[in-house]
Amino acid sequence: MGKASRDKRDIYYRKAKEEGWRARSAFKLLQIDEEFNIFEGVKRVVDLCAAPGSWSQVLSRKLYLPAKLSPDSKDIDLPLIVAIDLQPMAPIEGVIQVQGDITNARTAEVVIRHFDGCKADLVVCDGAPDVTGLHDMDEFVQSQLILAGLTIVTHILKRGGKFIAKIFRGKDTSLLYCQLKLFFTEVTFAKPKSSRNSSIEAFAVCENYSPPEGFNEKDLHRLLEKIGSPSGADDLDCSSGWLEGPNKVYIPFLACGDLSGYDSDRSYPLPKVADGSYQSLDPVQPPIAPPYKRALEMKKASSHGVRGLENLSLDP
Ligand code: SAM
């Protein structure tokens, strides 16, 4: 699809370029904030699975830049924003970047070290695996990313803090809700206006971090597994039995963002400029290390003859 036709079909894609966001996902975080006021009082935040960086841009513009530009900026500690992703990310003012896998304990330790004994007020996670189209598989891999995020949360989030995580709605959504509800007094599943209805994506907005009494971070996975087994169901504080039939858990689900605003599933006409033509904007930040880069290099090398291929292998 050409840039102009995508601009027409996807209003948030066009608006993102106009407003200088690296990805249309920025609007999802902004719309979640409109509904839940997630940035209030936030001084330290972790952005998990952050590349190409539009959520980090939101954090920088909402938290770091206003503090830096305020008249008393010399007397206050500027907000600390740590962003992490498997992919490298172009720099963003006020954002410390860590390249790594959030499911790896060593990466989690690096993030934790940046907080130097202090706790975070907010952890956001927009992580998504490369979707296969097999919903069960995609939902499972997605839930592994959320659990990795929750592991980091249990180490660095302060009591009362918030955790926002992308989820894929599926048959295990109730279980995930109960797992999150163990750690947060308020859990809502939200669908921002900018997230297409055709997508199974939604966001868990978890408020007021309050781990169970006597909770030890090392026990996290044991605790979650216990909830996942019917015999452990008695431990659920959100259900008196298993999650089926009359004991089914009803999850608070909320559409968020200005509901009279742009609908991500609709096509909008392109704005007219003076001479009647429409000029599509280039991406705000082209990918710096896209997965297709190597394939392009190989294609180029092959068009220059076999000798060009000698130094290229498909191994990472
Ligand atoms: N929030 C980002 C933004 O606004 O620009 C978009 C995030 S994108 C939808 C999902 C990201 O998750 C990808 O950049 C991918 O590299 C990252 N990701 C997936 N699995 C990961 C993992 N195990 N550790 C770190 N990042 C991961």
Image (cartoon, rainbow, N blue to C red):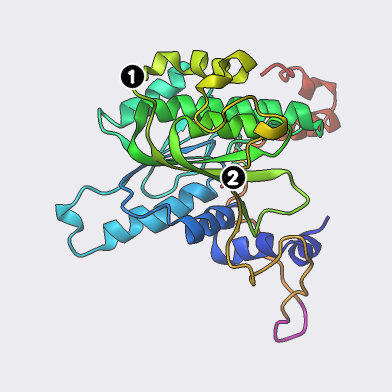
User: Would you say residue 85 is visible in this rendering?
Assistant: no
Name the element at disc 2. strand
Residue, x 58% and y 51% (percent of image)?
Answer: 285
Residue 157, compared with residue 67, is above or below; it is above
The percent position of residue 204, horizontal first and vertical second, equals 56, 42
* Horizontal and vertical percent position of residue 164: 50, 42
Q: CA distance from mark 2 to mark 1?
A: 28 Å
* Label 2 sits on residue: 203
Say which residue appears at 34% left-offset and 40% top-offset: 160
Q: Which residues are magenta?
A: 272-277
Which kind of residue does numbered mark 2 sit on?
Answer: Phe
Q: Is residue 173 left or right of residue 32?
A: right
* Residue at 32% in and 61% down: 66
- Provide the secondary structure element on which disc 1 rests: loop
The quarter of the picture where the N terminus appears is bottom right
Q: Which one is nearer the viewer's eye here, 274 or 35? A: 35
The circle drawn on residue 214 is: 1
Within-10-Å neighbours for mark 2: few <14, some 14–19, many 20+: many
Residue 268 position by quadrant: bottom right
